[in-house]
Image (cartoon, rainbow, N blue to C red):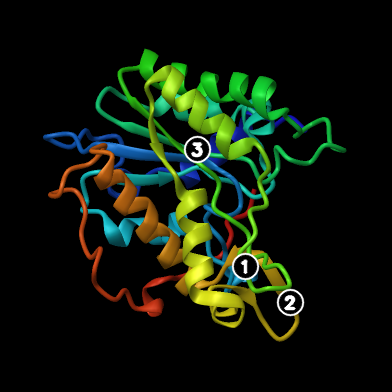
Amino acid sequence: MSLTRRQVTVAALAAVPLGVAVAGTAQASPRHRTLYIAGDSTAAQKYADAAPETGWGMALPFLLHKDPLVSNHAVNGRSSKSFVDEGRLDVILGAIRPGDFLLIQFAHNDEKATDPARYTEPWTTYQDYLRLYTDGARARGARPVLATAVERRRFDADGNAVPTHGDYPAAMRALAQEERVALLDIQALSLALWQRLGVEETKKYFNWTATEQDNTHFNPPGAIAVARLVAGELLRTRVLGPHDVRRLGEEIPESWITWPEASAT
């Protein structure tokens, strides 16, 4: 489904970094860098009607200083293809500036082979769509950053964490190497984290409630844990420097996560 011009505009305004929203159109001096997130529901902003479900993009600002600002454009249910087809990448590319970053995480919905609006094939169309993001960012003087998709909570009968994303992480790794794009290997790191935590402890990180057992989406502790992986990888790959990150080894209170009311569209 394509977005109307008004819906795209509303989406763009909703994702404006807080500091920019407060300042209106006035340009900060010096201008803060912005880290844009393009992704799916695992990273997306959640609202009051979805609590305690939490996207890792909601927790990332607590691990970064105010420069860079975080502008989270991730949206539930989107693939690398549908995000483009709905005009959401165009919104980001219309706002991104030299010195900014575009962090790209897709695969969960690219895998849906029965849905032609979202499905991509790992070694062909998935890589083709990812190039639209990386090339678009570079053409505007911004730095693209690829992030393999965070793993779902799945264990085999022996209690081993099981990968769920097929060839998509390998396809992204290959593209990152080919295009010389920084890669955050969140799939491998999250799989290792779930393995260390184990079958029962991981339930405390996913959106398990009295009425729902969700092995894909996170609650606040899970979102904070994955955001910590993301921030650590941004530092390890030298996308960001030590002065850009904070609290990597500190406890982040769950109470810092809030769910605003969804604005009417």
Which of the pair 192/255 is nearer the observer?
A: 192
- Secondary structure beneath dot 2 equals loop
Q: How would you rate the neighbour count of disc 2 (Cα within 10 Å): few for under 14, some for 14-19, many for 20 or more? A: few
Q: Position of residue 43 (x, y in %)?
A: 52, 52
**Label ID, residue 212:** 2
Q: Which residue is label 1 attached to?
A: 160
- Between the C-alphas of marks 2 and 3, the distance is 31 Å
Q: Which of marks 1 and 2 is nearer the N terminus?
A: 1
Q: Work out which residue is located at the far right of the displayed protein and give it.
A: 114
Which residue is located at x 58 percent, y 70 percent?
Answer: 48
Residue 39 to residue 132: above or below: below
Q: Position of residue 257 (x, y in %)?
A: 42, 71
**Label ID, residue 218:** none
Q: Position of residue 226 (x, y in %)?
A: 44, 60
- Secondary structure beneath dot 1 equals loop
Judged left or right of residue 56, residue 18 is: left
Callout in the foreground (3, 1): 1
Q: Which residue is label 3 attached to?
A: 12
- Secondary structure beneath dot 3 equals helix
Rendered-image quadrant of the N terminus? top right
Which of the pair 122/259 is nearer the observer?
A: 122
Q: Which of marks 3 and 1 is nearer the N terminus?
A: 3
